Image: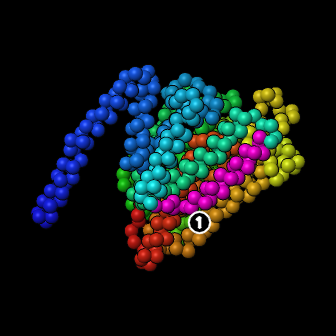
Amino acid sequence: MIPAISSSSAAIRAKSASIYGTPWMIRSIAIALALGLLLALLPLGIALAVVAAVLLVVTAYLKPELVLYLLMAAIIMARDTTEEVVSSGGIPFFADLKLMKGVPQASVAVLLVLFAVFFAKRLLLERKGSLISFWYLAGYFLLVLFAHAVGTQNGNDPLDIYNDVGRFIYPALAFYLCVNVLNSGNKIRSMLWVLIGACATKTLLLDINYLTGHGEPYQDSSVVTMDSAVLMAAGFLVSLVCALLLHRRRIKALPMVLLSMLPMTFALVFSFRRGHWVGQLASFALLYLLSCRSARKTMVYWALAGGVAGCLLLAVGGMRAGSGHATTSLVTRFESIFDPGQYSNRHHFEESAITLGDLEERPLLGMGLGGVHSAVPGAWREEDQPLHIVHNTFLYVWMKLGLPGLLLFLAAGAAFLKKLYQYRKIAGRAPNRPFVAGIGSGAGILLAMFATGPVAWYFHQTFLVVLFVAICLNLIRLDQHAVTASPAAGASDV
């Protein structure tokens, strides 16, 4: 052992001597002087931006997963500037703003730099391919390019076309990046810890705002948040922790994890977002299907206990109706899910009907990128209506990318669900089953969000969607390799 260590040390010293020789020192000093002179001549803001860019490139080259962790944490913590948020005081949150003119918002800029550096290193230096073929990405790019041509031919606003290109291209790049960077159990575990920490922190601050009277205004009251990206992440993580507990999987720092679930659950309930309520119930239903027999039995007991608690909550809300108590709002919002005359339900239905009517005139090509649908008659003023979006992601994709885009979107979703269904064949021997069940069950949350909102319009929502899908696919891949290598199934990689 000593000779080997000594030999290794000698080799390291020899390598250091060659690296830190005179020519290397001269080059380093020259580069440092040139960089220092450049920064001295630039305005302070631009100089800081240059330093940040250099640090980003170096870190992306050496530790791409670290940049991805920080990027996803920032996406949860920051406000997506695509969404209009009305401030009501309380604890402020930083926005995902553009760094300078001509540069996309900060999260997109970091994503593009990380993508370029990571794949330049992987493809050119390491001579490795992508875990998912780039041919799929090339075909998708052609589809977006065709939609661009349709939008241009229809005379759509060039700026709207440019913005729509980013909304469909950037999430695809993020998906390829997440799949290739998070390629091991350790990296996935680290990412999940980062997500839990960021989401718990953000929801805790939002909960404090709400409880101190500074919640986000909504109609005549206030809610914890209207940020669907944060609520989606919270829903996925709640389902994941439930899956780990149901399968009796040992969790490090269990008390801390359980405490982190409290602000997330509070935010999910008291944001009064009915789509997320329905999505969470759908997620639990999928979790039941993906879990083992003993976990299902435990889940039935949990469901019965939750049902009793829910009935008590509804009863209390009914008795205290008119008192302004929060339970009254919960009861009212829950009942409104089934009310076709409720304002939001009616408007979304009419908006979807108007969009379908527009698509009947051009079902194959849609409106193209930058396209809009007709105004909803009888609603608020036409100039105030968000005609670029429709509160149904399936119709939104059809409107922007045409029927081929809609079919591709449906095929991708079907392929993901098929992966989950096929996984059940090896689930009994798969070491990461609780993780796959917890994250895969989030498909119920996504389905509810796609049915009730324009998810593809918001960068933060789409980035988190592709992140969770990529994690789930990589966990399935790791389990397939583990089961093939050892039919007896080993310990979890995560």
Magenta-tinted stretch: 128-152
Taking the magenta stretch, the answer to whether it contains residue 130 is yes
Q: Quadrant of the C terminus?
A: bottom left
Total count of labels? 1
On the image, numbered disc 1 is attached to which residue?
420
Nearer to me, 481 or 222: 481
- The kind of residue on which mark 1 rests is Leu
Q: Nearer the viewer, residue 14 or 236?
A: 14
* Residue 239 highlighted magenta (yes or no): no
Q: Nearer the viewer, residue 474 or 209?
A: 474
Residue at the spot 25% in from the left edge and 37% down from the top edge: 26
Residue 345 placement (x, y as % from top left): 77, 42
Residue at the spot 39% in from the left edge and 44% down from the top edge? 59
Residue 79 visible in the current orientation: no
- Residue 199 against residue 126 in the figure, above or below: above
Q: Say how the picture is coloured.
A: rainbow
Res 187 quadrant in image: bottom left
**Residue 302, percent across and down?**
54, 58
Q: Nearer the viewer, residue 129 or 408?
A: 129
Name the spot of residue 85 as percent of width and height, x first.
Answer: 62, 30
**The N terminus - image quarter:** bottom left
